[in-house]
Structure formats: C-alpha cells, structure tokens
Image (cartoon, coloured by chain):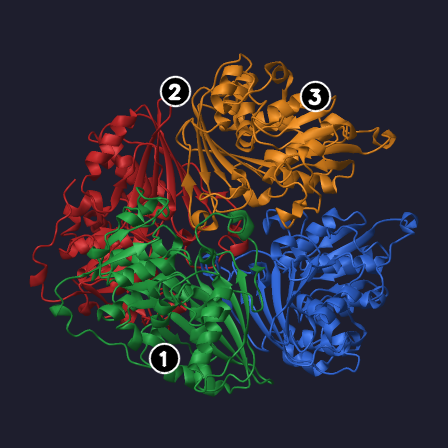
Chain colours: A red, B orange, C blue, D green
Amino acid sequence: MPAPRESTDRAERASTASVGIYGASGTTGVELARLLHRHPDADVAFATSRSESGATLDAFDPAAPRIPLVHPDEADLASVDAVFLCVPHGTAGPLAERCVTAGVRVIDVSGDHRLRDADLHRRTYGSERSEALAERAVYGLTEFARDQVRDAKLVANPGCYATASILGLAPLAAAGFLTDLSIVDAKSGVSGAGRAPTATNHFCSVSEDVRPYKVGRVHRHVAEIEQELAAHDPEGRAHRIVFNPHLVPLERGIEATIVVRGADVDDVRSAYARTYEGEPFIRLLAPDETARIRAVARTNRADIGVCDVEGTDAVVVTVALDNLVKGAAGQAVQNLNVMLGLAETTGLEG
Amino acid sequence: MPAPRESTDRAERASTASVGIYGASGTTGVELARLLHRHPDADVAFATSRSESGATLDAFDPAAPRIPLVHPDEADLASVDAVFLCVPHGTAGPLAERCVTAGVRVIDVSGDHRLRDADLHRRTYGSERSEALAERAVYGLTEFARDQVRDAKLVANPGCYATASILGLAPLAAAGFLTDLSIVDAKSGVSGAGRAPTATNHFCSVSEDVRPYKVGRVHRHVAEIEQELAAHDPEGRAHRIVFNPHLVPLERGIEATIVVRGADVDDVRSAYARTYEGEPFIRLLAPDETARIRAVARTNRADIGVCDVEGTDAVVVTVALDNLVKGAAGQAVQNLNVMLGLAETTGLEG
Amino acid sequence: MPAPRESTDRAERASTASVGIYGASGTTGVELARLLHRHPDADVAFATSRSESGATLDAFDPAAPRIPLVHPDEADLASVDAVFLCVPHGTAGPLAERCVTAGVRVIDVSGDHRLRDADLHRRTYGSERSEALAERAVYGLTEFARDQVRDAKLVANPGCYATASILGLAPLAAAGFLTDLSIVDAKSGVSGAGRAPTATNHFCSVSEDVRPYKVGRVHRHVAEIEQELAAHDPEGRAHRIVFNPHLVPLERGIEATIVVRGADVDDVRSAYARTYEGEPFIRLLAPDETARIRAVARTNRADIGVCDVEGTDAVVVTVALDNLVKGAAGQAVQNLNVMLGLAETTGLEG
Amino acid sequence: MPAPRESTDRAERASTASVGIYGASGTTGVELARLLHRHPDADVAFATSRSESGATLDAFDPAAPRIPLVHPDEADLASVDAVFLCVPHGTAGPLAERCVTAGVRVIDVSGDHRLRDADLHRRTYGSERSEALAERAVYGLTEFARDQVRDAKLVANPGCYATASILGLAPLAAAGFLTDLSIVDAKSGVSGAGRAPTATNHFCSVSEDVRPYKVGRVHRHVAEIEQELAAHDPEGRAHRIVFNPHLVPLERGIEATIVVRGADVDDVRSAYARTYEGEPFIRLLAPDETARIRAVARTNRADIGVCDVEGTDAVVVTVALDNLVKGAAGQAVQNLNVMLGLAETTGLEG
C-alpha cells in the first residue's frame, strides 16, 4: 500500500483550508461538522440544509457545534477549497457536477459515485448521475486509494458496511485467498439508519431487539463490496458475498464477523500484516483476539481480529469500526487530509 | 414429529404436581420460579440456594416471586414429583443421581447430561458424572423428543444457543440438505451469561458494544449442536458448524443467522413446514421475513425465517427465541408438562 | 377504601364479556390488546385503526397478538358490552357520546373526560367534549373509585404520571398532611410518549440521555393531579404541586420521587398502610426501601416506599409503576373487571 | 469570580509537565489517562495499580490508551510535577501526605480531603487522614477556587453529584436566595458507581430500571454540598438540602433537577449570569430551556437551565454534566491546568 505521507511542508501552507458541508443536518453531516470543528487546519465556511436553513446544527444534535445552517442556494462555492456532500443519493450527482465545474473538489458521502458500472449504479440506486463525472471519481477507501485521492476532483466516500467488509476481505482477494463465497454477518448501531424518525428507529422498537434485515445479496452495499473485491483481485475475478446486516440496540458502531473458506489462518494474518503495516488507523489484533465496537467507538480506527476454526478449512475474521467515523465522516476527513497534503491523522483520533 | 398430546384426562388428575428447584437464585432458576409461579398445575415445594439460603428469591431479581430459599440439604426430596437442576455443571451430575435414586424425575438445566459421548463430555465440560445415568438421559429439545421425554427419568435440557441452532439445522440434516459446513452467527442478550457480576456483564462494558467471543468451534454448545445434527441425519453423518457467538446490549433473547449451502430455498422451507407443522411453539415466518428478538421475548416461541440469496447456492435462515424461556426455563417447563401428561402449552406463552 | 369485591357469582355468568378497542394501533391500544388476549373472561370483538385498517396489530409491535384492525366505521357497537377509547383526546369525546348513547359502556383512556371543570379542560386540552357527558364520567383510579366505577357508563382512565402521583399524594391529602407545595420528580420510559416516530423518541436521541421537559406546572397531568388532591382533601382545599417529568432511556415504567414537607414519617407510612390495606395492586415497601421500576414492569402493581430525611421536616416518597399497565391499559382492564363484577385481578399480574 | 487566566507566557515554558496517576485502573483513572493522553502540555510519567500492575490500561477499558500499569511502590515521585489520586478514600490520605512531603503537588480525586471539619469527615468517610494536611487542602471546584488552586499543594477534587449541585446552588446561596430547604433530584449514569462488578451494576439489573437510592440526607456528597453552601453564604449560614440520587440506565452523565423556594426566577437567572460570565465550561441555557445529558457528555461543560413555576414561589433549575469529566477527571485536569499556569481549557472540550 502507498504509505501515508507526512506533510513536511505544512508550515509553508499559507492558510487553513476552507470547506463546505452540503446536507449538514443529517447524521453524517453532524458528525463531520463535529470533526471539522476540532480540525486544526480546516474551517467550515458553510453548512447547508434545504429544509432547516436558519436553524443551528445543535438543534439536531445537542452535542453538535452551534453552526448556522444556510439554504444551499446561499452557499458561496467561491469561498471554499472543497465540499462534502451529505445529501441523499440522487441529489449528490448533480450537485457534484456543479461543484467540480466551479473548480471545487468534492468528497461525496452519498452512494452516487461509488459504483463504476453505470448499469449496476442504476439498478442499485436508481438515480441519475453524470457518467462522465462518475468515471473520474475515486473510490476513497483511503488505505487503498490515497495515491489517487491526492489529486482527485471527486472522491466517492465508501459506505459504512462496505468499509468494514472491504478492510476485511480486500487483502484476501488481493492475495488470491478468496476461493469461495465469503459470509459477512454485520451488526450496526442505529445511527447508520439516519436521523429521520421512523417506526424502525423508535427507541421502543430498537431496544431489547436484534433485527436482521435485507439479508443475502439485497443490501445496496453488496454491489460496492463486490466491485472492490474484483478490483483488488490481481486477475479481476468476481467474488460474491453473502451479506447479512442486523440492527442492534446501540447508537454507533459496526461489527462484521466474516467467514472465509480454504485459506490458511497464518496466511490470512500475514496478508493483513503486510497490507496494513504502518497504517495509523488499522490495528491488527493479537491471534484469536476479536474486534469489538467499544474499542473503536468515536475513533477513526478499524480493528481486525483473525481466529482459526479448528477441524475445518474456515477462518473467522472480525472487524469493528465506528460507522459514523471510519465508516463515514472520519474517512471523509481522512480523504480531505490526503487531498490537502496534510498528515492523514490531522484532526482524527486513531 | 410426534404430535403434542392434548391432555384429555386433565380433570381426572388428583392434584397439582409438586416440584423443586435446585440452584434457584441463578438467572435460569429465577425465570423458572416465575414461570412455575403462574403455572396452574405445578407448585414449587422448595427452591434451594447453597450460598443464599434464608433469603427470598426477589432479593436477586425484584421481579421474581417472593419464594424462600432453603439450603439444598433441607430440601425434602420426598415431597416432590420432579426437580429442576439449575446448579453449575459438575454439581448437577451427582445431584441428578441422588434424585433419580430417590425416585424423583429430573430436568437437568446444566450441561452435565447433554453430551452422550463420555470422552466428549469430559473434554467439553471436564466434569465428573455417572456414565450409567448419562446413558439414560434424554436430550430434551421437546419438539424432537417428546416421546422419550414422556417417560424419562432424566431430561437433559438443551443449551440456549443449542436450541436456536438445532431448531434451525436439524430439519435440514434430517432431510439430507446439509452438504457443507454451516455457519451460525449468534447474538445473545446478557442474561445468557448468568447473574454473577463480572467485568464482562458490567453495564459500562456491555452498553454501546457488540462483542464476538469464542468464535469458531470453541463454544461448549458446538459439541451439543453437532451431536444432535448427526443424530438427526438419517445416515448418522457428522456435520460440522462454525459457531460465532456475540454479546449484544440487551437483557434477553438470542438471534441466530445461519447460512447453509447447496440447498434449494423452497426445499428448506418445506422441510421446516413439514417438521414443525402443528407445533405450538414454532412459527415459520413468511418467505423473506426475518426472525427478530422482540417478537419472541418473554414467550416460549421460536420464530424461523428463510431467505434466498440470489445468485448463489446459499440460503439464510434466521432463528429468534428468548434464551431464558425457550432457551432454558420455558423449555424445561415444556418438558415438565410432557412428563406430567399435561398439555404442552400449560403455563407457557406461545 | 371500598374493598375489592371478589366475584362470588362468577360461575353463574352466562358468557365472557365482549369488548372493542378504538385506536388499537397506538402504544396503549397494543398493550390493552395484549392484556385482553390473555384475559379469561373478555373477548376482543373488534380493534379499530382509522389509518391502518386491514393490517394486523403485530405489524405495529411484533409482540402484539395478530388481531385484525378494522376501520372504526366498520366496528359493530351492537356486538360489545364495553369499549376502550385509545384514540387522541378531542376524538374520544364525540366517540364516547356515540357509544354511551348506543348503550355501550366506555373506558376512555384519553384525557377527554378526566378534568371535571369545563374551563380547566378547555385550557388544558383545548378539545371539545359534551359537558353533560363529562359530568357523569367517573375518574377511574380504581383503588379510590371502584364503587362509582362499578355502575359507571363512562370511566375516565387516569394518566400514567397522574396515577403515580395520586397514589403517592392522595392518602396524604386525605389525612390532612399536605401543608406545603409537594415536589414530584418523575422519570418515564419512552413508551409514555406514544408510537408515532419523532426526533424525541429516536433511539439516538434517547439513549445515553436524561432529559427534563415541561417542568414546573406545565405538563397536562398537573391539572388532573391537583384536581384529585382537592377531591381527596376532606375540606376540599387546593394543593399545588411542582411536577418535573424526565425522559429516560428505557421502554416502560415510571418512577416518581416525591418530597412532602411538614409531615411525620410514621404518620405518612400509616396513612398508606391504612389506605392500601388489602389492595392487590399496591405494595407498601419496608421502611427506607425505595421503589424501582424493575420490580413492577409488566405488572399492574404500584410500589410505594417511604423514607425519612434526617434533620429536616421532609419525607421522601418513591412510587414505581409500569406506565403501560397500571398507568394505562392495566388500570383500564382493572376498571373493566370492576364494571363486569369480576375479581379485580382477573387477567392482571400483581 | 476570578477570571480564567489565559496563559500568555506559554511559549516560554521549558517543557511539558510530567504527572502521575495513582489508582489508574478505576473508572476515573481511566478517564484521566484518556484526557491526559491527548493533553498537549502534560505527559503521564506513571500510572499505578496495586492489584493490576503489569497489565496495560486498555485491559480495563478497550477505549483506554495502552499505558502500562506499575505497582505504586515502583512509581518514581521524583519524576513528576503533580499526581492525581484515584485510589479509594482512606488510602488517599496517607498517600497525599507522602507526595506533598516529597514536594509533589496533589490533586486528590477521592473524598479524603473534601470536608474541612474533622468530625464531619470521620462521620462521613470513617477514614484516617492528616488533619494538618487537610487544613491546607483547597476544595477544587475550579470556577470558584481557581485563585487558591493556582498555588495549592493539595487540591480536593469535588465529587460528581457535588459539582452538579454546587454549580446550581452556590450562586443562589451567595446571593442570599436560599431561604428554605432545597430539593435536589439527581440521576446518574452507571459509571458513577465505579468499575468493580456488583449485582447493582450488572447490565441485567440496570437496564429498563430507574432506581432511587440513599435518598434524603444519607448520600456522602450531602456533607460536601452543604459545606460549600455555607461557605458561599455571605453570612456563613447553614443550608440543608434533600438530595435524592437515582441510578439510570446509561453509562455517563448526571442530571440534577433542583427546586428552590422563595426566589424570583429573574433574580436566579441573573445570579447565574453574573457568576458564570466568561466561564468557558459553564453554559447558561435560554429561559425555560432544560439541561440534558446528551449535550454535555464527553465534555468538561456543565449546562444550567432555569424555569419558572407559574402560580408558586418555586424555581426549577436543571444542571447537566458528565460525571467522569466535569464531575471527576475533567475537572481534575482543569485544576492541573490552573496549577501549571496553562490556559484552563487546555486539553479539554467545552
């Protein structure tokens, strides 16, 4: 993997970067505002909300900074170096085009530019986008893409489940270890489903429950994960997965328990050790240790554990990350840092 | 499956049954006391606690009935028709022997009589037991064993994870559909780990976490599940599983998401429909519906959902039950009902 | 207090009662359906939902019985002995009138008939109602009103916070012990706020929070509580309270910590002991024991604890109950039992 | 109040401060390690644990930094400028003496030096301490004591409940507004009870409960609160409180709802505005807004809300803070900053 670049010329940069957040009142937007608020080298020039302009961000989350929300039409693109798009897919596509045309670099947190194949995108998201622009988008799982992110005009920030699954499976695809269907059993905190109140995220529906949903190959992130596994396979082979997501009663975090077949447990550990050596945000756990959410909550780190399954050809890999940080806003800031030539860890907790 | 027998001669029974609970202050003991307290045809003659005799049960759980706890030496075996053993494994073995010798029927909720093979038992639990007695024990997953339970002297009540896994996998083993390793990803509420306070069940350790533990083939229930799958296989073939348990922040309930390979989804559904037809405590969900804990909490019911995985040879089965009820105390009462010739649903919620 | 009447002529009753639930898909409606489903002497003839007719109740809560929902216009009033109104205030008023005119007895769970004074009602709820009918309504806190409930055409079922507060304060008002402002600090589970998803009951807003709201004398239940305190005062004096409600991260239950001044702690205990002697659903705790929610959850019981405050003239009273049971649906069933001449505890857990 | 001093000569300080933590494996110790780990001007030279030396801190909390724990006898006092005592009361007293004698400044997080009166201390804590040293201790509620903290040898860091209560009541005592018993109803997250596993902090005991405990004037923090109210009263008058603490199902945070009598609501607001003007860690909310835990969790801030109670002479004050931060470790760091002449906000989130 390309090494994270320590910014040696930091002192020479004339000023802090100026960024904008579109769709700031959603879960990811609020988390992004919180991270950028503490970021030493980036200032939030504007934060938009189509329906809530006039309010301040802390009206949506009492722990958010008191940043005023403006209508997107009032956002001054000329004032910023980069923007984050936290608007719904379908809306992000056209907005990204406008920003890039205006010379502003874009980190798209929606799903609008994650899938390279136009047909697959349409089938998965059903939303319009500029295919010309989509072709230039960089899939921004930073650990694998920092060289392209550095100069990208448009970064497609990965999905939360996708980040966990790809961190666990891509090194194995790259090493040629994925010879069979991989099984990913994922559990997510409720913030992954957004801020809009629904029957599903009502406290009395979530508490004291575990709820599997969209199991198999139905969840949108499956397309994104399988696309990246093929991309990491040295021969470009397709790799299917069974992806079973579950809603669990906690606010933030994803834990993915992955079962792969036919690989040697030591080879699997070595593949991770090699791939993630020196990575500030990836921690390979001791043999037979498992990854848990409490260890990574509110950080940009992903933990990875590898366990043998005695008497079988299976290996169990556990991955944990914070869906709002490494799975969304934190990785977006990590990508911003790369784009700005800053140390990748700036403003982030590892 | 042998049909649940409706007790037609209920009116003729001279009196309610009298039962005892050994180890009543533990999680399962308390749940059992609660269920028996409401049971119309059984009275609790004694409830024991070695360390807590003199207290009443509600000292351990404010929602428990105010039943006095006596020292086990004071328990009058002559006064009861049957006993439940909620004591730790290793202790249950000798106690079962004493009870059976005294002519009292035993439902052993511990692991001491679940594994038929003596070596496997010793490797798994490391505890002494009478092998002669163990040979006569009936593995009491009621839906599959009611004919033997009816006249059993000693019923080995299944483990909570084992009940969920076997309900999901045994019909497939019986139908010859298990041709590959099955993957069971299980999530359990905290009550599954017992009442003794530990660093692991401290509120501040559990909340906002998902924690995989003993993944692979390390958990004790694996032996029990694999034993039963072989028993259900018409040709007695061994079936290995990968069993990945997780601790999640809720009090009660187990959800198991199972991936099987090589079986047709309609055949799988048919196998369940056939096996569980008329079962009062098993509910087969509509196609593509998934089982969730809130639907079964505080009932003796298990829900089973079957989902196709498009483009693969995998089928996803979800099973949910209450670990304290169908996974422990409720199934114990279900077994008691069978032993007493009562309707199986007496005192239980379906 | 009038003693609960044991129904001695139960065997002579020709048939079980037939009841209807209006507004069954709300939180109280679902709880009521669950309780009535297990009730040995009452059948649910219809359950209505204006917006959700055609669905079954378990679509709104997976633990609810699978009762079909019909449009209120299809509900056959002629088929029932009594109805429960779980519709919003403002809607309950006219509906109650129609039912009573049709000769059907009504238990109104809304706030439409709780306040006797027409002006106070209008200021508090702003809703229309028939004042002629309101005058005939019985305020159904069963322990205090069973003699009037027995023959009532219309019972106004008390609010959840009001039930907890009145159980704690009315015996003191009756004994002349309330000589100063009483302070009620109440904490409620999220189910108290209903099933409609809002920003306030989103899991990610409730978890890890304690949130005071409508503190002082702003909450609607204040009017109801103060009305009843005056009614219990032998001289009809007004008693003001400070009522501070809080939203806490749990599903069900209310705990009220009440501070009264100027009364002797032993006198306070005696007043409760006298008032609640023989009451099946009220438990007076041992001196200095405090009431907690876990002890009463899913029961129709209220626990009351009395604690001295050394060196002051204050007494602390703690009251706990399940807001959905004794605070709503359970008390409604308790009232139904009284109206039907059944044992008050029928179908309820104490 | 003395204004927080902005450290203007920061650049001239030769080096970062070196500090030690005694009793680092407890809840407060871990939080302190976490805060100091991020502190730009302080390094943790040692962290001790009598029973767990050899382990690293993250063994006790997966989110803690991986700091090695040494036996207290191995801690090199000569290497540090200041120490934090997170050991139990009774142990802190003698340890403080040793440190002060060695010329090391002490911030005692235990209760050993909070109470000035020797008799009151003995009655409250029953622990030995050097009265000579206790006399020199500064009660370190920073907003009120920064001038004495600056040069203190020994700072007694306030209790969590005490911090919330004093922030709410001291300005009113100082203004002469406390003319009657004040009622404090406090709710605390489970971390307030420490890390040692007990029946009380077991997940299955805490979840779905609200539990009042030690109500009245029984809790240890009452002595500390009443001591400080007398100290703030211009005439030194005693002020009694009724203090009712509750355990609620969340990890961190305290909310205190305080009722005071006989004061004008505008005067109360003015007293807070005057007292806390310019304070970086105190936020006075808008009129009728209430303080909630989610707004302050993981920050060193306390929020204060003031609400009128129409028709009475009562005012309701709500205070929220994070018991582990402003209520313990954060305030300890705030005190360290003052002692070191740093900006008070260094390393803390407001």
Disc 1 versus disc 2: distance between alpha carbons? 66 Å
**Which labelled disc corresponds to residue D97?**
none
Chain identity of mark 2: A
Chain identity of mark 3: B
**Residue A235 visible in the displayed image:** yes
Q: Who is closer to the viewer here, B95 or C343?
A: B95
Q: Position of residue A200 (x, y in %)?
A: 50, 52
Q: Tell me which corner region of the image, top left, top right, bottom left or bottom right, holds residue C224.
A: bottom right
Q: Secondary structure at mark 3?
A: helix
Q: Secondary structure at mark 1?
A: helix
Q: Secondary structure at mark 2?
A: loop
Q: Position of residue C124 (x, y in %)?
A: 64, 78
Q: Tell me which corner region of the image, top left, top right, bottom left or bottom right, holds residue C341.
A: bottom right
Q: Is residue B206 left or right of residue B100?
A: left
**Which labelled disc corresponds to residue D276?**
1
Q: Which residue is mark 2?
A: A311
Disc 2 versus disc 3: distance between alpha carbons? 37 Å
Q: Which residue is mark 3?
A: B100
At label 3, counting other C-alpha atoms closer than 10 Å, the crowd grade (few under 14, some 14-19, many 20 or more) is some
For image coordinates 39% across by 20% down, the residue present is A311
Q: Is residue D339 above or below residue D67?
A: below
Q: Is residue B84 left or right of residue D95?
A: right
Q: Are marks 3 and 1 on the same chain?
A: no
The amino acid pointed to by label 2 is Gly
At label 1, counting other C-alpha atoms closer than 10 Å, the crowd grade (few under 14, some 14-19, many 20 or more) is many
At label 2, counting other C-alpha atoms closer than 10 Å, the crowd grade (few under 14, some 14-19, many 20 or more) is few
Q: Is residue B171 left or right of residue D286?
A: right
Q: Is residue C53 left or right of residue A272?
A: right
Chain identity of mark 1: D
The amino acid pointed to by label 1 is Tyr
Q: Is residue A249 above or below residue D300?
A: above
